[in-house]
């Protein structure tokens, strides 16, 4: 990467210079700290949303703000469940509050165009709530309005790429937790943090059409993953990333 896009690696003077036009677009990655089986680290969701945000920002002359790693509770049908040691489930109030604060603080800095890039399935509605409350806060202030886009990066994988990468049928993004997409993206960007020799292979989890609390731990596969990442490769990661970033570039530049 030639130009630095991540403001947390900039000094304050460079940061202020980079946003002084008043027209900057800031991408804010939102992840989690969550178990991803035996073959990947706890930081997968934060690492991938940050990397994708940085590579996308570099293409559209945008910036990347502080990554949020206080993700909402892992749910059994999309992340294995928050009963599993290794997952850190933050209360909704926390996630909402952090997102609300980020929109408000960016507005105070003069950044009025914000894109939340979600990388943890369970976060989405709480990001949405934080943004909605922040816009309500700002409506009564002298700072002027902000515009905020929210997305989960996997939604930009095209049907063509899904058909090509999942020839035996696509299990759905909810059970992708620790599966082919996340493992392939990790192999592409952080190969030193993927241990394929430790991967536990199994069929995609079959979960009921309801949630239970306390969770029935027997419903989550031993691996902690909801589908197998066995056939993951860095090349698949590259194809997925290209599809995701092309879609995000289109979406962001069409609105901002
Ligand atoms: Zn994940
Ligand atoms: Mn997750």
Image (tube, rainbow, N blue to C red):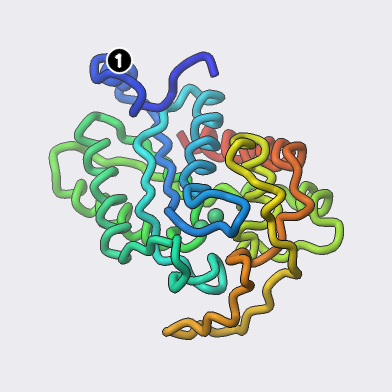
Q: Is residue 171 left or right of residue 98?
A: right
Q: Nearer the viewer, residue 189 or 4?
A: 189
Q: Is residue 151 visible?
A: no
Q: Which residue is mark 1?
A: 14
| Residue 213 in picture, x, y percent from top left | 43, 84
Position above or below: 163 against 254: below
Quarter that holds the C terminus:
top left
Q: Nearer the viewer, residue 10 or 27?
A: 10
Q: Is residue 214 above or below residue 38?
A: below
Residue 202 in sight here: yes
Residue 54 on image: x %, y %: 50, 31
Which image quadrant shows ligand 1?
Answer: bottom right
Q: Quadrant of residue 106?
A: top left
For mark 1, give the secondary structure: helix
The residue at 44%/50% (across/down) is: 31
> Where's residue 206, x and y in %?
68, 78
In this image, 38 relative to 8: left or right?
Answer: right
**198 shown above or below 247:** below
Relative placement, left or right, of 178 versus 43 is right
The quadrant in which the N terminus is found is top right
Most foreground residue, 187 or 109: 187
């Amino acid at each position: 990467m030639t130009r630095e896009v991540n403001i947390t690696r900039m000094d304050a003077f460079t940061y202020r210079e980079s946003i002084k036009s008043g027209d900057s677009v800031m991408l804010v990655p939102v992840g989690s700290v969550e178990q991803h089986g035996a073959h990947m680290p706890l930081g997968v969701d934060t690492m991938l949303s940050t990397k994708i945000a940085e590579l996308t920002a570099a293409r559209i002359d945008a910036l990347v703000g502080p990554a949020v790693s206080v993700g909402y509770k892992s749910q059994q049908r999309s992340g294995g469940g928050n009963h599993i040691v290794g997952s850190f489930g933050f209360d909704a109030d926390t996630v909402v509050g952090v997102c609300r604060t980020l929109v408000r603080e960016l507005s105070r800095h003069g950044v009025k165009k914000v894109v939340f890039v979600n990388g943890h399935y369970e976060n989405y509605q709480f990001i949405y709530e934080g943004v909605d409350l922040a816009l309500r806060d700002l409506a009564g202030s002298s700072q002027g309005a902000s515009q905020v886009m929210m997305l989960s990066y996997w939604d930009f994988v095209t049907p063509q790429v899904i058909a090509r990468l999942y020839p035996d049928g696509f299990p759905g993004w909810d059970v992708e937790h620790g599966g082919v997409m996340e493992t392939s993206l990790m192999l592409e960007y952080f190969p030193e943090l993927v241990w394929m020799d430790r991967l536990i292979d199994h069929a995609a989890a079959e979960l009921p059409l309801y949630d239970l609390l306390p969770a029935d731990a027997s419903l989550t596969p031993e691996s902690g993953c909801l589908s197998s990442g066995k056939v993951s490769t860095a090349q698949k990661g590259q194809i997925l990333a290209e599809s995701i970033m092309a879609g995000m570039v289109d979406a962001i530049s069409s609105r901002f």
